[in-house]
Amino acid sequence: MKERLIEFLKTYCLFICIFVLQKPLFMLYYHSLYEEISCADWLNVIWNGLPLDLSIAGYLTIIPGFLFITSVWALSEGLHRICCGYFLLISILISVIFTVDMGLYEYWGFRLDATPLFYFFSSPKDAVASVSIWMVIGGIIAMAVYAVLLYGLFYGTLLRKKQFLRMKLPYRRLRVSGWLLLMTAILFIPIRGGFTVSTMNVGKVYFSANQRLNHAAINPAFSLMESLSKQKDFGNQYRFMEAAEADSIFKNLIDPAVSGEKAEVTDSSQQSTDSLRALFTTQRPDVLFVILESFSSRLMTSLGGESDIAVHLDSLSKEGVLFTNFYANSFRTDRGLVAILSGYPAQPTTSIMKYPRKTQSIPAIAGSLKKAGYQTHYYYGGDADFTNMRSYLISSGFETIVSDQDFPVSDRLSKWGAHDHLVFNRLLSDLKTESPEATSEKSAHPHFRVLQTSSSHEPFEVPYRRLKNDRLNAFAYTDSCIGAFVKQYRELPQWKNTVIVFVPDHLGAYPENLNNLQVERYQIPLLMVGGAIREPKRIDVYGSQQDIAATLLAQLALPHNEFTFSKDMLNPASPHFAFFTVPDAFGMVTSDNQVIFNCEADAVAVDEGAAKGKNIPLGKAYLQKLYDDIAKR
């Protein structure tokens, strides 16, 4: 009995040691992020991360525990082979998880969860488009080497054949089996995280105001497992308060009639545009959305950013409608697209685009405009099947979708497909070939078009060189494509009846080194230009991507009641706030309070402004109601 109990404890402790050692390895790999931390911080990372290590080690020791119980009754070479197979599989899994996590953290800014897996399995080619072939090869080699080292460690410590078969069958087998079963059952304690109401979760390792240290303490295997377990259980996630309280708060956030600023007519979907701030000269303009990959406010001097980057957008902002306090709703394209095109907020733990059955039931601007007589078109130089995009676009109401396969192979020179100037040129070509009656201001079939750019994404390889910095040069390239496109569009008869909406999908690559828990990471431009714009304006109300739907439809005097989470930013009676999410955190920003709440750590990460704390319960209620809505779809 003694030798089996020792081997059982040795197995559990060996897993713990492996996971503990991974933390300094992670920090050494990203040494530039941890240059200024003290020795105490290194120890705190290891100590505070230990609960997750104990938990995942417990999960991995359950099967060896039952194998040890089996060895009490039948010790054979077959059982030895089963043990070797199990530890070989675990060695490979640990190696893959640790190596992938190490490689992706630089791009994602958070430890491994289910999101990269979704992107990879939906389109492996696009998922690795940001990574060089040498990095992929290096990663595979690193996985293989690490897996061999781990298996060698397990074999030399636990699985040597002579050592394994030297264990004797005990005399009192039931007693020994009982003790081993008890030891295996005790693993429930570290797995669960103790006996308190709160079970083990990633937030238990958060200990520092420095988010990099908290990230270093996270066990990536546990983070991935927890994320996978959350993917479908929407109805039980983010339960901050009683349902009635959440309903009451949420109603005040979306219903202008109870927002505290009364108006004679408060439902903007029933108002004429004249009773609002009318932005357009006509009620049925052609509408073009240009969704800009990863752009931020910091690229435009008109929004307080740097000069000589987005020079054409800056120039256009002087003749258009510029929203100066506008925020991205999330951190990735698939989430940003749904927020922009469906007025549906992004989710911290998943992407609703992953679930075609659910996206079929959410409203969309394309669907609403299609009912109003618009023809709908989508232009993208990349793979429209990436992250279930095509199924979402079709269910949203887009009649034609132009993607990478519609360009010659010679034009698909980028890792993301066709470069931006080629996509703009394709749209211009289609505009020029429209029938004469389609260009009339009173055309029975106005057009809603969306053009999604991609060239300002990693690896920032573009057919253009104006700036030395590759990132900034990629943004300058897309901006130059915008300038050339608008210049030619002005010469077409459609221009006088057109509104172009420029909005990024999310803020991504610049400024560099912003983490997910900084408010400025989400500040993006929203700019409307075109011949149908009544006059230049700067609008300072707070809003985020999901508010575009209600705002646009209200300007077109079309109903938007089905867009539950979208509010008309130009309705004076509507509450004005921005809301965004990242993995297990949300932010809510108003003129008097800027909040980011870390749901993992159950702690406030940012709380600034004159009315500190005001937005925390509002954001909690908003997020809770969002997950209520997802669960019902």
Image (tube, grey):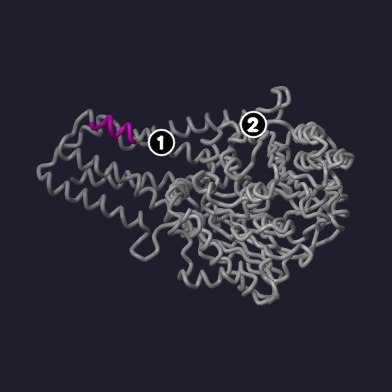
595 w.r.t. 62: above or below: below
Label disc, if present, on residue 47 of the rendered structure: none
Closer mark to the observer between disc 2 and disc 1: 2
Relative placement, left or right, of 16 versus 602 is left
Task: Please give the residue where the numbered disc 2 appears in the rendered image.
Answer: 132
Relative placement, left or right, of 256 versus 2 is right
Label disc, if present, on residue 91 of the rendered structure: 1
Q: Quadrant of residue 543?
A: bottom right
* Magenta highlight range: 79-86
- Seen as rendered, the residue at the extreme right is 491
Q: Position of residue 546 (x, y in %)?
A: 64, 56
Sequence order check, earlier mark of 2 and 1: 1
Residue occupying image coordinates x 36% and y 57%:
192
Which image quarter is the N terminus in? top left
Q: Main secondary structure of the magenta part?
A: helix
Q: Amino acid at mark 2?
A: Ser
145 w.r.t. 375: above or below: above
Residue 416 seen by the camera: no
